[in-house]
Structures are given as structure tokens and as C-alpha cells.
Image: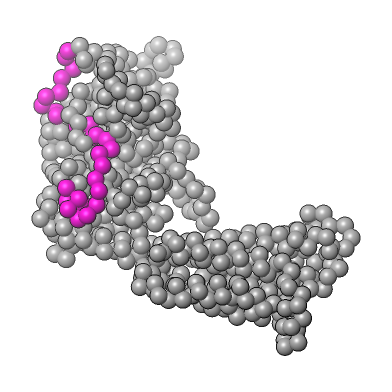
């Protein structure tokens, strides 16, 4: 019902606008003028345009089952019934609006979703949208009455007339028809007042910022990670500052999430005791239903996928995580020749590596490390959500590990040592994976450094693992690894080959094939990861939300934070799912 109702309301809004700007039946107009003054009829036509515009804007909220949108639409449709009668005895439009009101009243139980959290920045967005819509409708009004404009009327003069009309000033254009002149003047003034009123209301009402992690949430999540952090390599990424969390009744488990374009997006497995997962999952789904958000999970393990499947979601494998067993890793053998050669080349060039826990670095060095990583990232879009921490060097992240590659400090171009202090040329940042594991978060380097430096750092991490008490390393995530691998095998079918070709083509933007190959050369164990969703029809919207969360898809945003502020927040310079 909600999608159908939203479509009908959208059509009703269009009908209101078209009905108001087109001439009415002369016989009906003569009859209504015997009852009401002509000015009231013309003002009703202007109000009908405004009602139609508001119906267009509220149709999306109605589709998402928002209770406030339902209240607004019912009120506007009831007003539309009266306005259609007053402006020209338009019984047909009035009857259609009345029938639609009746249908919405009968289906009121399906519109119970709460409104989304919002901030005062919404005032700027709504004001800009209404102003643009007002100007567009004003220009359309002038085009409809173009044959009744007196004198020259280029587009620049028409635009000036519309803008003046929004603030109550009669513009430079003159009309041969008094009715059209009054309609344009009253409509523009009504829409201008609507825009100003909406902006003032949104600015003055108490702000409701989007929820973030509180100190109690962070303390509780760290306690769960201390007890159950070995279960999921992505657990520590739940501490990102842009996530919020829903807890089970016992607070023994929680689900971190973020709402993106109407999708309630969780990543990884729920934190905590898996016996308490069902309580946190039920609360997560309850909140999603309460706000008409689409619940979705990306990157959960097989254990997590089974828990979400029992809760009613569908599960689909969409990639694999590369995990290195430190004890079994070796550079020997033909399969490791490329890695062995890259590491040897970097070592012969004089590079050295340091591996330290963040708590062992002085605060000044952590600050320099953060500044250097930001400089290497440059102006690239900040990316990360499911597999990025979004910061480096924070005091609370003392268990994180950083590997730093230094050159020999001389002037390489001259071929001498030069006696200069070694320079930092690349770094890897790992977050804890329980007590005996690390999960790759950040991989950045100086673009002028030698090739193979990332290979050198990963091998150095394996070599340093024993001293850090680490037994396993989680590397990059490979999207659709199985499809890429099967597609290049002998005897692969045409569908598999075509899908692989598509993935290779998309790798130009999303590093799908290149990341798979980078991971594969270390001969890791592959751990499958899954996406959970309510229904197949939700997958396109979830995919867009995931791309937006990972910052592969960036919509223009009004009221965004200043660039200087954004640059202070370090997020790794590649796909959050790739961690590269």
C-alpha cells in the first residue's frame, strides 16, 4: 500500500499544479463568481499550486511509511478538495482528492514509521529545494501565459519577475489578462512565504543531531571486545566515531550501525556473546521497522550470517577476507617468487622497518605520523565504514600496531648515503583482532618510493608478529573472489566468464581484480564474508547505500563540514572494504 499511495499522491500533486495554472471552464468560473469574489478564486488557485508542490515533496516520506508524512498528506488533500471547489468548481479534481483521503484513512495503520533524526542543516537543504521549485514553477507559469505577456520578455526579465514575486514585489512584466497576472503574483508570493516559513521553523526548532557513540557505549563495546574480540576480525572497527549502537536487553551483545539513505547498515558480526546476539538483532530490526529503514549487514562471517538468517534476513556471499597464518607463512617456493623478489629488491635499496604498538610511540611522534599519512592521502576522498577505523594515533587505541618503512636517508639520486636521517616512506596500521590477531586498517605510502614497499611491510608484519604476540593477520577484503577465480579456470562457462569480465571492467574504479591479485600472492586462507538483506528488491538500494557509506559514491551535500575539518579526520585512502 505505501508505494501505491505515494505514487497516487505524487500524481495528485501534479494534477493540482496543472489544474491551477491552466484556464478553467468559463461557465463554472461565472457561476463561482456569483458566489465568491474573483480575488478569492484566484488566491485559491495560487494556494492549490503550493499544495501540489507540498504533495510532491511528501510523497517520498509516504512511501517510507512515515507517520508525519501521512498526517501532512491527509491535511493537504483535504485542503485540496476545498481549494478545487473554490478556484473554479473543479469537481473532478476535488472528488479524486477526496477518494484518496478516504483510502489513506483506511490504510492509516500502515503509516506508523517515526521520522528520521535531523539537524538544523536540513533547514538549508529544504529552503534551497523549495526556492528552486518555486522559481521553476514560476517560470512554467510564465511560459503557459507567454502569449498574454505585453512587451519584450526575455528569459532574464522573466527570471527577475519570478524572484521579485517571491518576496512580494510585482516584477517588470505586464500581462494582457488580469486573471493570469493575479495568479502569477499570488502564487509566487504564497510560495515565497512557504519557503521562508519552512526555513524559519526548521532553524528555530530544537535540533536533533544524529546519534553517535556515547562514552558508556564505547566503554561497553571495549569490554565486549576484551572478552569476545577473537571471534571477528572486524570487531574493532565498530568503534568508528560515525556509528551508533543498539544493545540487547542484557547488554551482553550489541550491533553497531549507521543509517545511510534510508538503509540501516551494520557491518561485521554483532559484538559480544553469541548467545545474546538474537536479543541485539531483534532490537536492531525493531528500530529499523520503527523508522521504516531497510536493515542490512555487510561483511558478516558465516556464524553471523546464520544468526541474521534465523532472524529472517536473506544471506548472500559476496567476497572473501584474506587471513595469513603467521606460523605457516613462508617465502620459500615457486608460488612466493614474486613476493620474495619484491621484498629482496626493497631490502637491497636500503629500506628498514619498525613495528610498534601505538602506546609505545610518544604523543609527538603519533601526531607526526598522523600528519604524514594525511599528506600522502592528499585530496583523495575519505573512504571507509565497514573495515576502517577512521583515525590513527588516538590515545584510546594503544593496542593498535603501526609498521613504518624508512629509507636509508641519503640522496638516492646521487647514489650516496649523505648522512641524512632516514625518512618515513610508508606505513601500515593494524587494529587488534582479539588477543592474538591483527586486522589491517590503513595502508599508505609515498608515491615516489620504490615499488614493492607494501609487500615488504606485510612480510615485515609477519616477521614481527611473534614479538607482538600475534598469530594471524587479516589483510584486504576481496570482492567476489570466488567468481574471479572460477572465471579464469579452464572450462569456465560463458556466464561465469562474462561475470568475471564485468568485475575486471569495474576494477577500473573499485579495485576488485587488483585487490584479489594482491591478496592472492601471499597465499592466505580465505574466509568468506556475507551480505544480509530483507528481500532481493532491496539489493539495489542497499548497494547504493554501501557505496555511499564507503565513500565510493558522493552525493552533493549542502551544509557539509568545511574541508579543513574533514582533513583533520584521517580515513585510509582506499576502499574500506579493501583496506588498501
Location of the N terminus by quadrant is bottom left
Dividing the image into 4 quarters, which one contains the C terminus?
top left
Q: Residue furthest bottom?
A: 35
**Residue 472 can be seen, yes or no:** yes
Residue beneath the point at 78% across and 54% down:
155
User: How far across and down, in percent of the image, does residue 419 sit?
Assistant: 36, 19
Residue 23 picture location, percent across and down: 74, 69
Query: Residue 388 sits in which quadrant?
Result: top left
Q: Position of residue 461 (x, y in %)?
A: 21, 29
Name the residue nearer the viewer: 164 or 173.
173
Q: Is residue 353 left or right of residue 144?
A: left
Please say whether residue 359 is one of the residues in the magenta stretch. no
Residue 77 visible in image? no
Q: Is residue 338 left or right of residue 101?
A: left
The front one of 407 and 153 is: 153
Q: Nearer the viewer, residue 147 or 156?
A: 147
Q: Residue at x 20, y 11 (%)?
A: 334
Question: Does the stretch in magenta take in 318?
Answer: yes
- Which residue appears at 35% of the width and 29% of the height? 499
Q: Is residue 73 left or right of residue 454?
A: right
In the current view of this chain or complex, which residue is farthest to the right? 151
Question: Which residue is located at x 31 percent, y 61 percent?
Answer: 288
518 is higher (above) or lower (below) than 248: above
Vertically, is 538 above or below 122? above
Extent of the magenta region:
306-333
**Vertical order, 550 against 201 (above or below):** above
Residue 469, given in percent of the width and then of the height, sits at 12, 35
The quadrant in which residue 424 appears is top left
Residue 472 vs residue 372, the one in the foreground: 472
Amino acid at each position: 500500500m505505501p508505494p501505491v499511495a505515494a505514487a497516487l499522491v505524487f500524481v495528485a500533486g501534479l494534477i493540482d499544479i496543472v489544474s491551477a495554472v491552466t484556464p478553467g471552464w468559463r461557465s463554472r468560473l461565472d457561476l463561482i463568481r456569483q458566489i465568491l469574489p474573483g480575488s478569492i478564486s484566484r488566491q485559491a488557485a495560487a494556494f492549490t499550486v503550493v499544495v501540489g508542490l507540498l504533495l510532491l515533496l511528501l510523497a517520498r516520506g509516504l512511501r517510507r511509511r512515515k507517520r508525519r508524512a501521512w498526517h501532512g498528506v491527509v491535511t493537504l488533500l483535504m485542503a485540496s478538495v476545498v481549494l478545487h471547489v473554490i478556484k473554479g468548481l473543479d469537481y473532478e479534481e476535488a472528488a479524486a482528492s477526496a477518494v484518496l483521503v478516504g483510502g489513506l484513512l483506511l490504510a492509516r495503520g500502515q503509516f506508523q514509521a517515526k521520522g528520521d533524526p535531523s539537524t538544523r542543516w536540513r533547514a538549508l537543504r529544504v529552503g534551497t529545494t523549495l526556492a528552486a521549485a518555486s522559481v521553476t514553477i514560476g517560470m512554467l507559469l510564465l511560459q503557459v501565459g507567454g502569449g498574454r505577456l505585453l512587451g519584450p520578455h526575455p528569459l532574464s526579465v522573466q527570471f527577475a519577475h519570478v524572484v521579485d514575486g517571491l518576496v512580494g514585489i510585482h516584477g517588470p512584466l505586464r500581462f494582457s489578462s488580469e486573471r493570469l497576472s493575479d495568479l502569477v503574483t499570488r502564487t509566487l508570493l504564497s510560495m515565497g512565504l512557504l519557503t521562508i516559513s519552512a526555513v524559519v521553523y526548521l532553524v528555530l526548532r530544537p535540533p536533533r543531531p544524529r546519534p553517535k557513540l556515547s562514552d558508556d557505549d564505547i566503554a561497553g563495546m571495549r569490554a565486549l571486545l576484551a572478552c569476545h574480540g577473537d571471534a571477528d576480525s572486524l570487531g574493532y572497527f565498530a568503534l568508528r566515531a560515525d556509528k551508533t549502537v543498539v544493545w540487547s536487553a542484557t547488554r551482553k551483545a550489541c550491533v553497531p550501525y549507521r543509517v545511510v539513505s534510508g538503509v540501516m547498515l551494520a557491518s561485521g558480526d554483532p559484538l559480544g556473546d553469541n548467545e545474546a546476539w538474537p536479543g541485539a538483532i531483534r532490537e536492531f530490526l525493531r528500530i529499523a521497522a520503527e523508522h521504516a529503514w531497510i536493515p542490512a549487514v555487510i561483511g558478516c562471517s558465516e556464524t553471523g550470517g546464520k544468526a541474521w538468517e534465523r532472524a529472517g534476513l536473506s544471506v548472500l556471499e559476496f567476497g572473501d577476507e584474506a587471513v595469513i597464518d603467521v606460523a605457516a607463512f613462508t617465502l620459500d617456493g615457486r608460488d612466493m617468487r614474486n613476493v620474495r623478489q619484491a621484498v629482496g629488491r626493497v631490502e637491497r635499496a636500503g629500506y628498514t622497518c619498525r613495528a610498534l604498538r601505538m602506546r609505545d610511540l610518544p604523543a609527538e611522534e603519533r601526531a607526526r605520523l598522523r600528519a604524514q599519512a594525511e599528506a600522502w592521502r592528499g585530496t583523495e576522498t575519505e573512504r571507509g565504514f565497514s573495515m576502517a577505523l577512521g583515525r590513527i594515533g588516538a590515545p584510546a587505541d594503544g593496542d593498535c600496531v603501526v609498521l613504518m618503512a624508512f629509507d636509508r636517508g641519503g640522496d638516492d639520486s646521487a647514489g650516496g648515503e649523505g648522512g641524512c636521517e632516514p625518512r618515513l616512506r610508508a606505513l601500515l596500521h593494524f587494529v587488534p583482532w582479539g588477543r592474538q590477531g591483527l586486522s589491517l586498517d590503513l595502508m599508505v605510502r609515498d608515491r615516489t618510493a620504490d615499488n614493492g614497499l607494501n609487500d615488504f611491510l606485510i612480510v615485515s608484519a609477519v616477521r614481527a608478529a611473534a614479538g607482538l604476540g600475534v598469530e594471524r593477520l587479516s589483510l584486504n577484503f576481496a570482492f567476489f573472489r570466488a567468481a574471479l577465480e572460477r572465471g579464469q579456470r579452464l572450462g569456465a562457462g560463458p556466464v561465469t566468464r562474462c561475470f568475471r569480465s564485468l568485475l575486471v571492467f569495474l576494477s577500473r574504479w573499485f579495485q576488485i581484480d587488483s585487490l584479489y591479485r594482491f591478496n592472492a600472492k601471499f597465499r592466505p586462507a580465505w574466509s568468506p564474508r556475507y551480505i544480509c538483506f530483507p528481500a532481493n528488491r532491496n539489493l539495489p538500494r542497499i548497494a547504493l547505500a554501501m557505496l555511499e557509506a564507503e565513500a565510493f559514491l558522493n552525493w552533493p551535500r549542502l551544509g557539509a563540514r568545511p574541508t579543513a575539518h574533514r582533513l583533520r579526520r584521517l580515513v585510509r585512502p582506499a576502499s574500506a572494504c579493501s583496506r588498501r
